[in-house]
Image: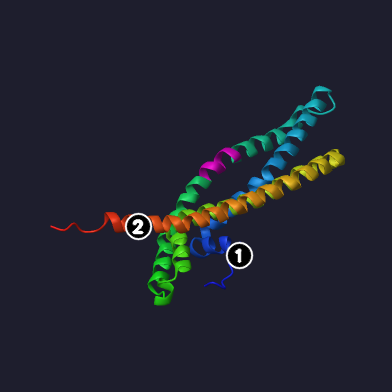
Amino acid sequence: MTNGRYKSIGILKIPFKYARKYSIVIGIQKILEGIVPTLQILVTARFLDVAIDIVSKNRDFSDIFIPLGLIVLLLVYSLMSEKLINFVNVKLEMKLRKNLRVFITEKRAKLKYNHVENNYTWDLISRVSKEPEVRCKNAYNEFLALIAMFVRIAGLLLVIFVHAWWAAIVILLIAVPLFTVALKNGKDSYEANREVSKYRRRFEYLGEVLTGRRKCS
């Protein structure tokens, strides 16, 4: 176990293994979440261009219906997708609770004695066994949200680059260092939480020893 390697792709593999249908729905929604803001900008710009041309009498009034319909469609999607994804997340958590907890319990039951007495093993188990379905669901959503953020930023930068390439470069030069700092802070925070979990396990164990002993009659 000490030589094990855990990669970020595991965040995607676990939900797909135990709740494939709901994982796919969430994945599609997150990708669309990254694309929709760029589409909203393009559609709104198109709507304004057509509206100005209509006011200038260079277009027929009927030309406004397509861009207006697209704006309404994107607004409806934005309102409905949040409610839908909340429902799907609940289903995903229930499915993971049903299947993932059973898998973890079986793994714990099959551990050899030398692992049971190993502090590293129990530190790992204490992190994994506490609400694994919630942790897995949140990690999956946050991982996909990160991908969606990159898609959204790439789309917005592309729109800006087409109209003012220098502004896109300036934004990129400012954003990269900020992202690097945020990534480092996130890693430090994770390492700190992992270190704290070791002491939390010992605290819980000592608490059980002190409060769970039978009273002598």
Amino acid tagged 2: Leu
| Chain part drawn in magenta | 78-84
Provide the residue designation for mark 1. Answer: 7
Whether residue 144 can be seen here? no
Q: Would you say the magenta stretch is mainly helix, strand or loop?
A: helix
- Residue 45: x, y in percent? 77, 34
Image point (18%, 57%), residue name: 215
Report the front residue among 10 and 215: 215
The 10 Å Cα crowd at callout 1, few under 14, some 14 to 19, many 20 or more, is few
- Label 1: which secondary element: loop
- Residue 208: x, y in percent? 31, 57
Which of discs 2 and 1 lies nearer the camera? The answer is 2
Image point (59%, 69%), residue name: 5
Report the front residue among 206 and 108: 206
- Label 2: which secondary element: helix
Q: Quadrant of the C terminus?
A: bottom left
Provide the residue designation for mark 2. Answer: 206
Corner quadrant of residue 6: bottom right
- Which color mode does the image show? rainbow
Image point (79%, 28%), residue name: 60
Magenta residue check for 16? no
The 10 Å Cα crowd at callout 2, few under 14, some 14 to 19, many 20 or more, is few
